[in-house]
Image: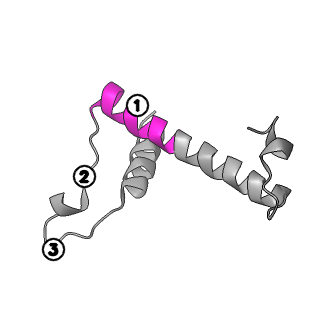
């Protein structure tokens, strides 16, 4: 995408708009890769909102991925 960004710029947009899209897609791809890797390699399944008990604070899936990765680094 970065190589073709000038071709991707719509008439009502600038380079910053395309750069933001590239960054967002890169982040989301990385997040999905980590989520899948945690499940397939480590058996770490993320909890959905409805799986949290009433008295338990909900933790977003993004936060669950970050926490799992941080814990792995700590345990190295």
Q: Which residues are magenta?
A: 30-43
Tell me if residue 39 is in the magenta stretch. Answer: yes
Predominant SS of the magenta segment = helix
Q: Which residue is mark 3?
A: 55
Q: Residue at x 36, y 54 (%)?
A: 61
Say which element carries label 2.
loop
Alpha carbon distance from label 3 to label 2: 15 Å
Q: Position of residue 76 (x, y in %)?
A: 46, 33
Mark 3 in CB contact with mark 2 (< 8 angstroms): no
Q: Which one is nearer the viewer's eye here, 4 or 48?
A: 4
Q: Which residue is mark 2?
A: 47
Q: Is residue 47 left or right of residue 11?
A: left
Q: Residue at x 31, y 33 (%)?
A: 39
Q: Position of residue 37 (x, y in %)?
A: 40, 31
Tell me if residue 73 is in the magenta stretch. Answer: no
Say which element carries label 1.
helix
């Amino acid at each position: 995408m970065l190589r073709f960004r000038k071709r991707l710029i719509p008439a009502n947009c600038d380079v910053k708009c395309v750069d933001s899209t590239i960054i967002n897609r890169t982040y989301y791809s990385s997040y999905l890769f980590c989520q899948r890797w945690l499940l397939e390699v480590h058996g770490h399944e993320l909890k959905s909102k409805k799986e949290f008990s009433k008295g338990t604070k909900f933790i977003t899936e993004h936060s669950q991925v970050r926490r799992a990765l941080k814990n792995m680094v700590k345990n190295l």
